[in-house]
Image (spheres, rainbow, N blue to C red):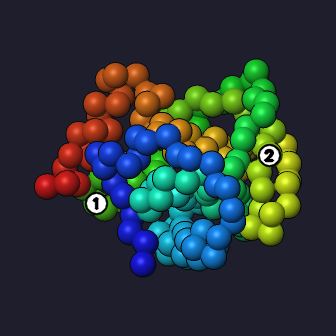
Amino acid sequence: MLQMKLCGDLVLREKCDAVGEISPDILRAMDEMVQMMHEQNGVGLAAPQVNITKRFLVMMNPDTEEVFRMINPKIVRKSEKVVSMEEGCLSVLGPDNLPVFADVVRPETVDVEWTNEKGELLAAQMSGLPARIVQHETDHLDGILFIDYLTPVKREMVMRKVRKHKK
């Protein structure tokens, strides 16, 4: 049974290692992560959020409800055009036990390459919410949280809520 790691846990700041072999353990973890994502009304979950320091994630396109299981995902191109959008994270919770949200500026469109659970190499251009989600989740694989993009004042406002959650 995987457990969600929360802001302040050092595993969320680790750079994850590439997946070599797609093992039954990784496939099981991905299945469980999809279930956790749905149960918590999330749209993405990266391996370090469940204490696994390997480069894989699950995400959903909220418009189509298509679920992506990405192993060793890599963003190979980012658009110059950026957009500000509200982001939250299942690992960054406030006193109400719900994600804390803040506006984050990111590229509007990205090209992504990854391996699926069958070992097939896939690529897609994503824009809108899917682009936002894949950037957020691949950041997790490099030990980056969305709060790292905030100004010091906004980050402190988010962290005040997070500290209230921990009490």
| Residue drawn at 67 percent across, 56 percent down | 20
49 horizontally vs 54: left or right: left
The N terminus appears in which quarter of the rendering? bottom left
CA gap, disc 2 to disc 1?
36 Å
Residue 158 in sight here: yes
**Nearest the camera: 8 or 41?**
8
- Rendered position, 116 above or below 27: above
Amino acid carrying label 2: it is Glu
Q: Is residue 99 visible?
A: no
- Which residue is disc 2 drawn over? 113
- Within-10-Å neighbours for mark 1: few <14, some 14–19, many 20+: few
Q: Which residue is mark 1?
A: 96
Q: Earlier in the sequence, mark 2 or mark 1?
A: 1
- Residue 58 in percent (x, y) is at 63, 61
Residue 40 position, x and y percent, is 47, 69
Report the residue at 35% width, 31% height from top: 155
Q: Decide: marks 2, 1 in contact (CB < 8 A)?
A: no
Q: Is residue 46 left or right of residue 109?
A: left
Q: Residue at image x 34%, y 22%?
A: 152
| SS under mark 1 | loop
Q: Position of residue 14 (x, y in %)?
A: 43, 42
Q: Label 2: few (<14), some or many (≥20) within 10 Å?
A: some
Q: Quadrant of residue 108?
A: top right
Quarter occupied by the C terminus: bottom left
3 or 103, which is in the foreground?
3
- SS class, disc 2: strand
